[in-house]
Amino acid sequence: RDDAPLISVTGLTVDRSRRRVLESIDLSVHAGEFVAIVGANGAGKTTLLQAIAGVRRPPRGTVVVDGLDVHRADARTLSSRIGFVFQNPEHQFVSHTVFDELAHGLRLRRVPEPEVQERVADLLGRFGLEERAQTHPFLLSGGEKRRLSVGTALVAGATLLALDEPTFGQDRARADELLGLLRRLNADGTTILIVTHDMQLVTEHADRTVVLAEGRMLRAGPTAEVFADDELVERAGLRPP
Ligand code: ATP
């Protein structure tokens, strides 16, 4: 059905080191949305993103993405549905060249080499990395590293991209460059879920904003409505741009 959500989170509860850090989260996200998860430090944003992406298994609750129970799916199936970009993307890199980094996920899947070459060439172009194909991933600029991490997250065909603080430590110009890329992916149908403290990013780009405080969801609504609610903004410790 058309109106079925892409992501359904039901009764999600997560503990870390025996501390409850998320309590009974219910959330739906539709295909094609650009959604921001915000809240003060320690509110549980990263934990929620990890649980949705299947990185972290919760003691209670379910996450269904595109009909798939993410906590029962094997890693390969998961990565064909959800691309996850960690806060420090260089920690994900496993290859000696940008080209091989993008090819890695395809070769693991035994995609025939001529097709690998073709698909990687296409990705290099889409992510503005053609000139860097033979460079070691660690030698890329911060912005190039982020773009490469987005490319590797999507190489297996995922249509949901989950990013943890993608603009952290970047100046406005570099952040906006990455956001331009995310907007193009979103326009092409990729659903975007972002954890961030960057309120300019949220108010300019997110259709909907999910507000967490101390492990609970205070609100999930259209971004403009969330930021028009002074009491909510104050309570969640958000700083409007
Ligand atoms: P930030 O904005 O600071 O990144 P966040 O909203 O993303 O915060 P989480 O990183 O999800 O919050 O953390 C939620 C809670 O889990 C916090 O209270 C934090 O102290 C706790 N926590 C984080 N990492 C661990 C860990 N490795 N072990 C135990 N508890 C943790």
Image: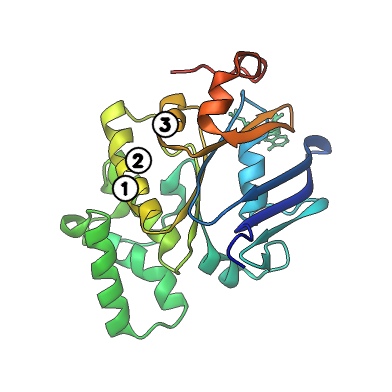
Q: Which residue is mark 2?
A: 179
Nearer the observer, 122 or 138? 122
Give how far across and how far down residue 192 sits, in percent: 48, 49
The reply to whether callout 3 and callout 2 are in contact (CB within 8 Å) is yes
Disc on res. 148: none
Give how far across and how far down residue 240 sits, in percent: 49, 18
| N-term mark: 1 or 3 | 1
The amino acid type of the residue labelled 2 equals: Leu
Left of 207 or right of it: where is 50? right
Circle 1 SS class? helix
The amino acid type of the residue labelled 3 equals: Leu
Instruction: Classify the position of the C terminus by image quarter.
Output: top left
Give how far across and how far down residue 68 sits, in percent: 66, 67
The amino acid type of the residue labelled 1 equals: Leu
CA gap between label 1 and label 3 equals 13 Å
Residue beneath the point at 31% across and 39% down: 142
Give how far across and how far down residue 183 sits, in percent: 35, 46
Circle 2 SS class? helix
Residue beneath the point at 61% across and 45% down: 49
The reply to whether callout 1 and callout 2 are in contact (CB within 8 Å) is yes
Q: Residues within 10 Å of mark 3 (few under 14, many from 20)?
A: some
Q: Quadrant of ligand 1?
A: top right
Q: Which residue is mark 1?
A: 181
CA gap between label 1 and label 2 equals 5 Å
Q: Which residue is mark 3?
A: 201
Residue beneath the point at 41% across and 74% down: 106
Left of 15 or right of it: where is 161? left
